[in-house]
Image (cartoon, rainbow, N blue to C red):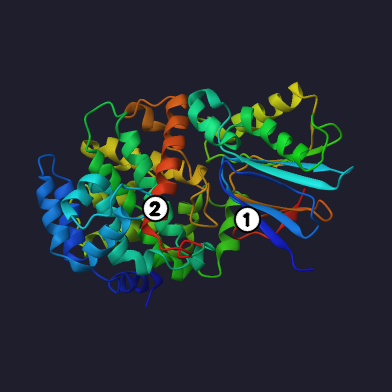
Amino acid sequence: MAIQEEIIAKVQEIPPLSTSALELVTIMGKADHDLQHTVHIVECDAGLTAKVLRAVNSAAFAIMEPTTSIAHAVSYLGEKMILGIALEACTGSILRRPLKGYAGKSNALWEHNLRTAMAAKEVAKLAEEDISLDIAFTGGILHDIGKAVLSEFLNGYAEDMISKIDAGEAADYIAAEHEMLGMDHSTVGYEVAHLWNLTFPLPEIIRFHHTPGKAKESVRALVYAVHLGDIMAMMGGSGTGSDDMQYRLDAGFSDYIQITQSDFEKIMLDVEVEFRKTKSSIFKRGESE
Amino acid sequence: MTMRVMTLGVGDLGAAKDPGIVIRTHALGSCVAVLLLDPKTRSVGMVHIALPESKINNVKAREKPGYFADTGVPALIKEMSRIGCHGNGKGMIVKLVGGAKIMDPNNTFNIGKRNVLAIKKILWSLKMGVVAEDVGGSISRTVTLGADKGRVVISSSGRNDWSV
């Protein structure tokens, strides 16, 4: 079997998203969705209910009195946090294991995706056109899902990949992945997106987050928001391993996102604070070490 | 001797003279670690700096001065003096690690370079200078500083360790 066929076969082994997570992803992409719908989704999922209550009652959020109300928890934490918890609950097993093919540690992929999501949401506020902050966040949470599959096929090749880039034989890590395997983590992530029945534009964001200029024009601003969020996450120290910083900035962002140096730094600072708070509330003590 | 590790996060700083301690900070992307070594007291210190100027958020700078170059470097020197070093940094060896950038020929959003320049500017104002550095490029670094011999070890995923 050709290596690409093996990779596609491995994609099929990815566990499905839970019904709750898929519902949350779907409704958060709709501008007119009702918060009560989110509350209902959580209330109908016992496992998700427990995780949401644990998060809201954690020291990170320091609410006055412990709560058992999901409506209160959703209102306090915000829907993006709820989505983060839901996705972590059903994808945590694959997103939290070490990315051996990237010489990456446990939880690196989950933390990188979460930080990218937070940054993408903030960058999206600076878009020339009105774009969905929720979809920017969701796209960020899912953008690197392909690495969870590709890691196995890159195991033992991290040094070779880096050598290729250092020698100028590959322009960046995406090019090195493609040269090694005939696929890269963005194309593999696109396959995972379809397996999970994710609706447009999420597969587009995942597919083109390193080459946003190639995304469909109708959603290119969104893809650029995730692209910049991804870069901010790496610069801030939340990368996934040997590929950290080894990607190119697509200069076309300036046609879609009006962001200055000062904006960039302020977002990095705000995201750092929010990320540390969220990380400590989602992960149990010791899990993030 | 079993070494104890003092791990610093973003914006954290620390100093030590106990030879059984190593100070370490991880995942320096565009962030820069400033390392101070005082041969006279055999003390070492480190701060993990994220951004060049505190004026973007003075509240954050008061909460965590190590986050910014202009508040972090003086804060580290103050911490070093707390454990017995000269109060104005006199005689200290300064090394810098980090300040990487994403691949971009236009150097857009090159926070790493801005951090390095801001650190050097504040050091210059304190009559201090950098004697060694491993900065720039497009790699994320982890740096470890040993209090026993002042050895600086840099690591990065997929690469062999090196020193500066």
Mark 1: which secondary structure?
Answer: loop
Which residue: 65% across, 41% down?
B47
**Residue A202 as seen in the image, left or right of residue A150:** left
Q: What is the x, y in percent for residue B36?
A: 76, 41
The residue mark sitting in front, 2 or 1, is 2
> Which residue position is annotated with label 2?
A59
- Do we see residue A197 in this rendering? no
- The crowding category of the residue bearing disc 1, from other C-alpha atoms within 10 Å (few below 14, some 14 to 19, many at least 20), is many
Q: Amino acid at mark 2?
A: Ala
Looking at the image, residue B51 lies above or below residue A183: above
- Residue A75: x and y in percent read 20, 45
- Whether labels 2 and 1 belong to a single chain: the reply is no
Residue situated in front as seen by the camera: A137 or A161: A137
Quarter of the image with the N terminus of chain A in it: bottom left
Check residue B156 in the rendering and tell me which mark sits there, or answer none. Answer: 1
Q: Is residue A239 above or below residue B39?
A: below
Secondary structure at badge 2 equals loop
Amino acid type at circle 1 is: Ser
Front-lying residue, A99 or A180: A99
User: A138 or A3: which is nearer to us?
Assistant: A138
Q: Mark 2 — on which chain does it sit?
A: A
Say above or below: A67 vs A251.
Answer: below
Number of numbered discs present? 2
Locate residue A267 relative to residue A203 in the image: left or right: right
> Which subunit holds the residue at mark 1?
B
- Where is residue A72 drawn, in percent x and y? 19, 49
Q: Residue at x 81, y 41 (%)?
A: B84
Q: Residue at x 31, y 74 (%)?
A: A9
Residue furthest to the bottom: A1
